[in-house]
Amino acid sequence: MRSHLYNNLEATKDIIIQQIDNGWPIPCLTLLHQHPSMEDYVWHWYIINGYEQFDSTLMVKTVTYGTWRWFDLPTLWDTGK
């Protein structure tokens, strides 16, 4: 069973880097999220199409509503739900 791979932040970080480096944007759907900065992303599709690594934090570039925004991956990942 490989289910542990789908709930691992570090594995997700590696997959995001690999996909973006290979030119593949990542479609995402967030159903619920506890963080106030994610309010516009609840029950909403968006695209991750970039990243920047700062020390141990991976920032991901999300695109929706015709504009982009940066989030640190741990905030995006931890929906609290």
Image: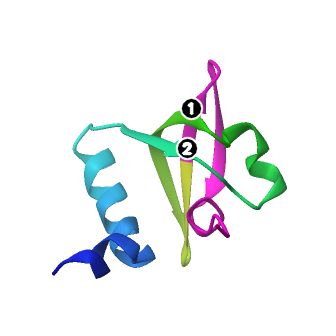
Give the residue drawn at x 76%, y 61%: 34
Q: Quadrant of the rendered structure where residue 65 is?
A: top right
Q: Nearer the viewer, residue 32 or 49?
A: 32
Instruction: Assign the N terminus to one quadrant of the image.
Output: bottom left
- Given the image, on which type of amino acid does mark 1 rest? Val
User: Is the residue 65 above or below the residue 79 in the image?
Assistant: above
Q: Quadrant of the C terminus?
A: bottom right
Identify the residue shown where x is 62% and y is 18%: 66
Residue 26 pos. (x, y %): 37, 41
Of residues 61 and 27, the one nearer the viewer is: 27
Which residue extends farthest right?
36
Magenta segment boundaries in residue numbering:
61-81
Mark 2 lies on residue: 61
Q: Where residue 68 appears, x then y in whole percent?
A: 63, 32
The residue depicted at 56 percent of the width and 40 percent of the height is 62
- Tag 2: amino acid: Lys
Q: Nearer the viewer, residue 54 or 63?
A: 63
User: Could you tell me which residue is drawn at 84 percent across and 54 percent down?
Assistant: 36
**Contact between labelled residues 2 and 1, with CB atoms less than 8 Å apart:** yes
Label 1: which residue?
Answer: 63
